[in-house]
Amino acid sequence: MITIPTRLGRRIINWLDVTYHKIWLFWYMLRVCLVILKRAIIHDMTKYSKGEAPYYEELFFELLTVKYGSMDYYILQSKLGPAKLHHFEHNSHHPEHWSDGITEMTPLDQVEMLCD
């Protein structure tokens, strides 16, 4: 026969159950946060590489002054071609990294893309 705890007993059991749940939730959310933090630290590190840095260094100031969507903008973008290809190849937070675009991205890739 099961004995039903008193009102105080039920409150304590409920508190312990909720607290146990919150501790596990905290643990898993902390793990996700650490992954996001690591991604933030290594984000766009390839822009320092030999495959990208020379292109961005050469065109940096021109890119600052050109109007987005203008013909000059697209000309500069074409000059960045090899750097952009390298960047997309090595950074999974870009849809261009994937053969099927955004549908193949992980939720963390998508979060990083939105923050970018």
Image (cartoon, rainbow, N blue to C red):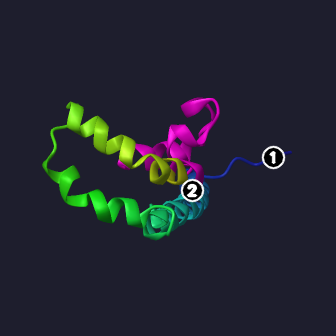
- How many C-alpha atoms fall within 10 Å of the one at disc 2: few (<14), some, or many (≥20)? few
- Numbered tag placed on residue 25 in the rendering: 2
**Which residue is nearer to you in this view: 98 or 69?**
69
Residue 61 horizontal/vertical position (percent): 19, 59
Q: In this rendering, is residue 92 above or below 72?
A: below
The quarter of the displayed image where residue 107 is located? top right
Q: Earlier in the sequence, mark 2 or mark 1?
A: 1
Please report the residue visible at 34 percent of the width from the left and 42 percent of the height from the top: 77
The percent position of residue 7, horizontal first and vertical second, equals 55, 50
Q: Report the side of 20 relative to 79 (left or right).
A: right
Highlighted range, magenta:
88-116
Q: What residue did someone put label 1 on?
A: 2
**Disc 1, SS:** loop
Identify the main secondary structure in magenta: helix
Residue type (three-letter) at the residue carrying disc 1: Ile
Q: CA distance from mark 2 to mark 1?
A: 30 Å
**SS at mark 2?**
helix
Q: Amino acid at mark 2?
A: Leu
Q: Nearer the viewer, mark 2 or mark 1?
A: 2
Residue 64: percent from the left, percent from the top? 17, 52
In the depicted structure, whether residue 72 falls above or below residue 39: above
Q: Nearer the viewer, residue 83 or 92?
A: 83
The residue depicted at 54 percent of the width and 53 percent of the height is 86
Which residue is found at the position 50% from the left and 69% from the top?
A: 50
In the displayed image of the protein, which residue is found farthest to the right? 1
Position of 40 with respect to 22 (left or right) is left
Residue 27's x, y, as percent? 58, 64
Q: Nearer the viewer, residue 27 or 116?
A: 116
Of 94 and 10, the residue lying toward us = 94
Res. 37 visible in picture: no
